[in-house]
Amino acid sequence: MKWTSLPSLMLFLFLNICDAAEATVAVRNGSGEEVLLQGFHWNSSRTPEKWYAALDRMASTIGNDGFTLIWMPPPWVDESRWQSATASGGGEGYFWQDFNKSSRYGTAEQLKQTASALNNAGVKVVYDVVPNHMSEKGVVTMFPRGRNEWRHDCARCDEGDPFMDGTADLNTGNAEVFETFKKEFTNLRDQFGAQGLRFDFVRGYAPETVDRWMKDFGDRQFCVGEMWKGPNEYPQGDWRRSASWQDALKDWSDRSHCTVFDFALKERMQNGTLAQWRDGLNGNPDPSWRQVAVTFVDNHDTGYSPGDFAGQHHWPLAEERRNQAYAYILSSPGTPTVYWPDMYDWNRGPLIRQLIKLRKNAGVRADSPIRFHTRYSGLVATISGSRKSVVIALGSDLERLPTELEKPALEWDAGAIRIWSVAAHAAPVSLRLNCDNAHPQRDESVYAVGSTLELGAWDPRHALALSASDGRWSASIEIPARQAIEWKCIVRSSDPSGVVYWQANPNTSVTTGTVSETTGRF
Ligand code: 7SA
Ligand code: CA
């Protein structure tokens, strides 16, 4: 491009620079292909070996295991102690008193050393930060009372919920408070290797405030919010009280442009069937929803931890579901999180290492498409990675396999987990299947059964049910294009195992994507 004059060049550059400054990413999910390790558990501040020293020692292992991000505990000193009838704690960082980095996890120097060891191992450091509240037990009170910097300084001196009775809540809507944290986040980035932040108790302040902090910390750096709030916890009149967990989580993410822990999936894992795990935020049909999910099985609140009282275990996933849960989150969309003890204390590492390898080999991303094959029991799905497709079958009655699934890439727990890695599928197209000249008797109906998973892999029990309209029985399916499939019409009773009769040979064959419908006749 020939420049006529210097002013036009300056104008062009200026416009581009402004553009870059404004361009807020859709969501700050790192590269979109991250694998997150929660780098601590509830009792990590009380272990014999200082936690930061342990992480330093394990940095290369953590990198080799395939993690690209590590969620560190809150780095600020916490001298609190508390005791209840069933538990005790304090010192974990969630009731911090100032920004001093020497804490029960180790010294500030050790933290710097550990952060650089992790970065050198290819693991980006994400610090847990707690701007909602703090302990005033510190030597110097960072925020003097009576200047609208605390929730209780005025009627509306808080942008969100209180932590406990709210006496420890800061007013993040106050410019002084906002600036103090903004400077500290920059300090964590420049002095302690931070390349991302995990925002604690985000129900306690405005998502827009998180967005403003992140614009300064780094508009493209990873951020995740802990939005743990069930619909029934919203006040009367708040739309979220009658919304789904997904809707409330997506609303928070839209306003903060940060990812959010997928409590919608956690709630389904806790209370739903395997098949209902597809209703997590990470399984949403819309990729702009899937990509904001940070999936997890348990964390330091919900799960058990090695050591005192076995941790907090507020909402632990049952032992028999845990392997399947890791198989699901590590092969499906969203950004998966592995909880430290599962990986390094309770010997789930061999399974998790293989799952991470499979994920990376296929190029599964946070926004990757996922299709659920709901005519099988359990959870059967196809995830389209950027390089390969991954098919998973968890606790399913999938027996007869399509030819492309001759050998699983991973089989665990006597088949409770089966995963295949196959050549990447083309994008799905809609295909209508028609059956003519069918004469089903009472309690009989017409189905289509064929060579692919979508058509039951020739197993009549998993055939596609058709519906009749003026003598023609038909139904439509979504199926990857450019697939040569074979199929037949069958008449079957409503009892899945009761096949009455098949369309005569030959099979009907069709290449998907070349036609919009295919017809078989009895
Ligand atoms: O019950 C589990 C689920 O069951 C399901 O069936 C339910 C779910 O809804 C249901 O469907 O989930 C519910 O319960 C969760 C756990 O309590 C709730 C969730 O909203 C609710 O739906 O999650 C909330 O609590 C978590 C611990 C928070 C969530 O963000 C929040 O939503 N997690 C993060 C937040 C904190 C605090 O920073 C950390 O808490 C977590 O590790 C972190 O991940 O204010 C001054 C003050 C006084 O007000 C008090 O009276 C006084 O006692 C101070 C003193 N408070 C002390 C606490 O009593 C004591 O417990 C405080 C200083 O220390 C402790 O607090 C610990 C907290 O116990 C611990 O979990 C805190 C500070 O050390 O650190 C941790
Ligand atoms: Ca608050």
Image (spheres, grey):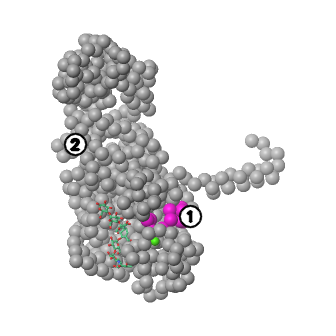
Q: Nearer the viewer, residue 18 or 448?
A: 448
List the residue tagged with mark 2: 395
Question: Ligand 1 falls in which quarter?
Answer: bottom left
Helix, strand or loop at disc 1? Answer: helix
List the residue tagged with mark 1: 212
Residue 204 belongs to the span the image colors magenta: yes
Percent of width and height locating residue 415: 19, 41
Q: Quadrant of residue 129?
A: bottom left
Identify the residue shown where x is 63% and y is 57%: 21
Identify the residue shown where x is 32% and y is 77%: 90
Marks 2/1: CA–CA distance? 44 Å
Percent of width and height locating residue 47: 27, 73
Q: Main secondary structure of the magenta part?
A: helix
Q: Amino acid at mark 1?
A: Arg
Going from N to C along the chain, the mark reached first, 2 or 1, is 1
Q: Nearer the viewer, residue 32 or 463?
A: 463
Percent of width and height locating residue 163: 40, 73
